Image (cartoon, rainbow, N blue to C red):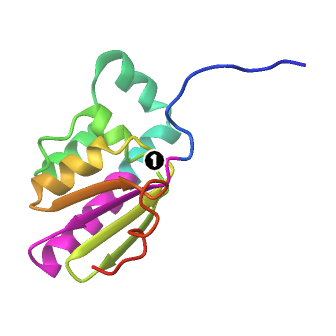
Amino acid sequence: MKIWRGYGSDHSSNLVMIGEFKTEEDAERVYELINMISENANSDFAKGIFEQWSKNDQLSEETENRLRELKLFSLSPPDVSDFALWNPSMERSGKTLRFRSDDVEIGGFVKLMVAEGAKVQVYSAHSYPDDEDKGD
């Protein structure tokens, strides 16, 4: 029998992240951007391109072109990697995007939402269970 002992921060964080935008159109745009970036990042991950990212800090040409096309110049390879295989519960309601996830690697999401004009709130539903189901 082997007993694994180690340190990690990827354990059931029960993270809640809320991005509040000035308009519904802004929220819809970021919702769509997240889906597009995730699609590219997952494609790169499936092709094994993430290994190259960690070695030379470069995105795939396809992902780099997509970010340029979307005018998202502030996202770095580590930021984009946050979008790969991240499977949060993401809901859009009016001017608000609400995420729930057990993953704490959210830097890319926060950076994108702030760059697109959101007011962002992040908390643990373990610590604030009464807040997680409150309306916008």
What percent of the width, then of the height, locates residue 129?
46, 64
Which region of the structure is painted magenta? 13-38
What amino acid is at disc 1?
Asn
Q: Quadrant of the N terminus?
A: top right
* Residue 20 falls inside the magenta stretch: yes
**Residue 115 visible, this orientation:** yes
The residue beneath circle 1 is 42
Above or below 26: residue 9 = above
**Residue 70 visible, this orientation:** no
Residue at the image position 28 percent from the left and 67 percent from the top: 32
Total marks placed: 1
Residue at the image position 11 percent from the left and 42 percent from the top: 73
What percent of the width, then of the height, locates residue 8?
53, 28
Q: Secondary structure at mark 1?
A: helix
Give the class, few, some or many, for how many residues have Cα within 10 Å of label 1's Cα (few <14, many ≥20): many
* Left or right of residue 11, residue 118 in this image: left
Q: Quadrant of the C terminus?
A: bottom left
* Snapshot quadrant of residue 78: top left
* Left or right of residue 117, residue 104 in this image: right
* Left or right of residue 3, residue 63 in this image: left
What percent of the width, then of the height, locates residue 52?
39, 23
